[in-house]
Amino acid sequence: MLTVHIDGKTTTIPAGGTILDAARKLDIDIPTLCYLNLEDLKVNNKAASCRICVVEVEGRRNLAPACATPATDGMVVKSNTLRVLNARKTVLELLLSDHPKDCLVCAKSGECELQDLAEKFGIRESPYDGGEMSHYRKDVSPSIIRDMDKCIMCRRCETMCNDIQTCGVLSGVNRGFTAVVAPAFEMNLADTVCTNCGQCVAVCPVGALVENDNSWDVVDALADPDKVVIVQTAPAVRAALGEDLGIAPGTSVTGKMAAALRRLGFDHIFDTDFAADLTIMEEGSEFLDRLTRYLGGDQTAKLPILTSCCPGWVKFFEHNFQDMLDVPSTAKSPQQMFGAIAKTYYADMLGIPRDKLVVVSVMPCLAKKYERARPEFSVDGNPDVDIVISTRELARLIKRMNIDFASLPDEDFDAPLGESTGAAPIFGVTGGVIEAALRTAYELATGETLQKVDFEDVRGMDGVKVATVQVGPHELRIGIAHGLGNARKLLNRVREGETFHAIEVMACPGGCIGGGGQPYHHGDIELLKLRTQVLYAEDAGKPLRKSHQNPYIIELYEKFLGKPLSEKSHHLLHTHYFK
Ligand code: HC1
Ligand code: SF4
């Protein structure tokens, strides 16, 4: 252990720690911008590029960046001298000299770490203003807007994209004032292997990377008297929406969210959780079909089945595992199953044509915006899901419409597409989809009642988990990964011949609860754990906890689909993948 003294206080930290680690242990606030340390994910942004965290170290002539300077035993540090403050002020003035001052209309205004520091340091103008500012074109993908005029070269996005997600889309190009983070050849993001996961957006401290905001499209649809506008909310949204609306993290806001959506003017308030139950019916049946054929010696039966509900993951395997495109489940994601059922079964119930019905999704995910726009999810140019907004965009809409969220009563979703079992909310957590599938697969395979529905072995935040689960006579080997880098590791093990029967992958840390459209998590794993607890509690509190028990799903099969994997189910609820 090392003993470190900062501003007259003393602490000890393990060897290898930095001055910043010691300061945080002492609750001494040293500002940071480029710093990003996701300890549980074993990732550290090593850029040390912004220099806002400089401190004085006794015995050293130069100021030292606290985030990148290893602590030594007996080190004496001053974190807040006049010299330090002046250096930080100069750093900010230099950053602002090449940064647009359009805070009034910036998507990140109010949540921008640079704006917060400029305000804290009372920066009113920069002595370095006056030169030509560099200008870049805006790059707009279905999910993300890149505005590189605002890039401060902190490189956090690169760390997320390259080290955690292993997508390798972003890297620093050019020198001096023209330096930015960009895809190779400065291509459009949409033309690269970007998965739209949005993890670069989740960690950008400024407005250089933001979601493609569709909240005004929702307002336009709601204002159109010729349309019936319905909404579905993803499992993970309810675990985090409150954070942007003044409610403590770790609080479920399911009932208030339904109430707020009703007050926003949606005609019917539905739930993606309903479609999560439907996904389990289709994916679980597909799994059992493949497993039975595989165990019977059918060489064409591919295992492990891979979950296919995460669109970032789908695009990742389409780019990186082209030799395995027949391995993932063909089941569409719950978002897309919901859209397909809404625009057929439900539109028929209402007696309206599909183009009169507008389906809005609220998702924790930016890739869902890209997913809804995939051409295979449209019929004659009319998409199954019309508009996707993120959790953050919904929070903005609620504020924009002057809805006092905290004092709303708890309300219910509408029937029939709003009912769900406990198996559905846990879709939003890493391990949850496979747990939900196991509950149903067990009962379908054995014909027996599953007594203990909690599969503890598939839960938890480890990046790659492997569990063995007994389903009747079969001992199944299950793999689970969250974060695309972990998914790559797991899939490489499959390629090398390791046996798995089923694998769940979610692109984002912790699963959808850590999605790129959620309130900014700033790499705080403890916050993600709180969100996780919300969803497990919602599951535990439901009277029915297995997807096949959902009475509205049973009715949907009886009245419309026939049975899982029927021709109609295949047509509406299954998809295929592209090289
Ligand atoms: Fe997800 Fe899913 S769990 S992909 O993470 O399968 O976004 O929440 O809606 O579609 O249900 C996201 C979450 C979400 C789908 C479901
Ligand atoms: Fe990389 Fe994901 Fe950002 Fe695309 S969205 S650039 S894959 S981090």
Image (cartoon, helix red, strand yellow):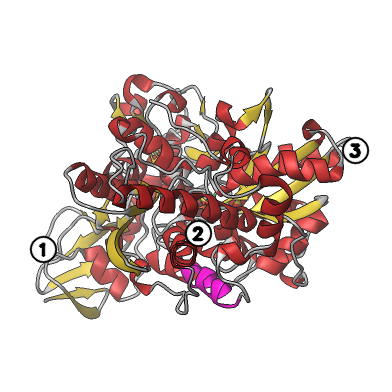
130 displayed left or right of 40: right
- Foreground mark, 1 or 3, reads 3
Q: Where is residue 153 drawn, in percent x and y?
A: 35, 38
46 displayed left or right of 294: left
Stretch in magenta: 531-541
63 displayed left or right of 168: left
Give the mark nearer the N terminus: 1 vs 3: 1
Q: Which residue is mark 2?
A: 427
- Residue for point 61% across, 74% down: 542
Q: Amino acid at mark 2?
A: Phe
Q: Is mark 2 within 8 Å of ligand 1?
A: yes
Q: Which residue is mark 1?
A: 59
Task: Give the vertical position of 452 relative to 96 (above or below).
Answer: below
Q: Where is residue 39 drawn, in percent x and y?
A: 28, 62
Question: From where the camera sits, is residue 376 visible?
Answer: yes
| Distance from the alpha carbon under mark 3 to that under mark 2 | 35 Å
Residue 225 - label: 3
Give the mark nearer the N terminus: 1 vs 2: 1
Give the mark nearer the N terminus: 3 vs 2: 3
200 displayed left or right of 357: left
- Foreground mark, 3 or 2, reads 2
Look at the magenta stretch and give its main secondary structure.
Answer: helix
